[in-house]
Image: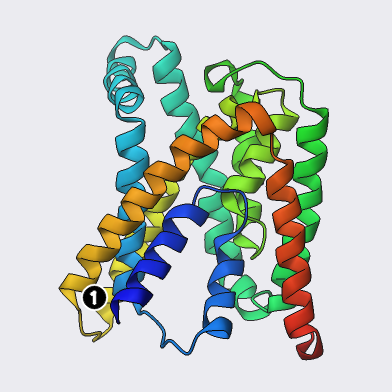
Amino acid sequence: MDYLQIIVLATLQGVTEFLPVSSSAHLILVPVLTDWEDQGLAFDIAVHVGTLLAVVTYFHRELQQMAAEWGRSMTTLRLSPSARLAWGLLLATIPVCIAGLVLKEAVESHLRSPLAIAAGLIGFGLLLAWADWRSRGKENEYDLTWAGMAFIGCAQALALFPGTSRSGITITAALMLGLSREGASRFSFLLSIPVILLAGGLQVVQLFQSAEAIDWMALLMGVIIAGISAVLCIHYFLVFIRRAGMQVFVIYRIFLGITLLALFWEGGF
């Protein structure tokens, strides 16, 4: 991998992991617009490590408090708001784990086409537009009920379908439940932590089973660039949505979906 490829792919992963715009759509466009070879599984793991470090760094105070009070709750059997949120994040992760085990092969075999991704971009983008337009919520992530967290977790399972966007569908579900834009986004970002850990763990297993050569310098650059771009993305995204909402991301999703349709229509679904 050359430096330009490392910078572009790591930045793309760092930004699209948390914006509601679908990383799978962007990763399909990269080989269309370039002649780059596949970056390999090791690099995919590296950029996921970078995004994980970014979200853990950004929310480190909340995570420290959640971890301490979650551990305390197992001995006292009393739930503080932080302990309750920690348990809720675990609850909300269960549906995507089950869906991943049941549907992963079917989705990868039949729904990875550019046109299917375009349909997901446009369809779920319009759903995000509706949820954001009707949103008048002022609640934050600590106000979610158990049922609400389970609902967002079930919505997250839809992100297995390419073009949906994990952050996009979880933010949409949280907005539908009455959370503020910031509260919905913060819960979505926190919910990404167990998902990235699980996905990264599976990738590590696959890496050990392969005989892929490893370029350690490329991996280190990927971790650093993905991490920095992800931290900046989280910070400025939360600032931006307080003022402008989600509609600009909806417009971008629709534009990107139309672009994929224009490029790949002859190929069919």
Instruction: State the residue at coordinates (62%, 41%).
Output: 170
In the displayed structure, does residue 230 sit left or right of residue 244?
Answer: left
In the rendered image of this protein, does residue 175 appear above or below residue 69?
Answer: below
- Identity, as a three-letter code, of the amino acid under mark 1: Phe
In the displayed structure, does residue 28 sit left or right of residue 232?
Answer: right
User: Is residue 261 in sight in this rendering?
Assistant: yes
Give the percent coordinates (x, y) of residue 191: 48, 39
Which quadrant holds residue 23? bottom right
The residue that label 1 is drawn on is 208
Which quadrant holds residue 205? bottom left
Give the percent coordinates (x, y) of residue 70: 33, 22
Query: Which of the image's four quarters has the N terminus?
Result: bottom left
In the displayed structure, does residue 63 sit left or right of residue 122?
Answer: left
Q: Nearer the viewer, residue 96 or 18?
A: 18
User: Is residue 148 in sight in this rendering?
Assistant: no
Which quadrant holds residue 180? top right
Q: Nearer the viewer, residue 193 or 56?
A: 56
Tag 1's secondary structure?
A: helix
Give the percent coordinates (x, y) of residue 255: 75, 62
**Given the current orientation, which residue lies at the most extreme left position?**
216
In the rendered image of this protein, does residue 138 appear above or below residue 208?
Answer: above
In the displayed structure, does residue 108 sit left or right of residue 81?
Answer: right
Q: Nearer the viewer, residue 99 or 120?
A: 120
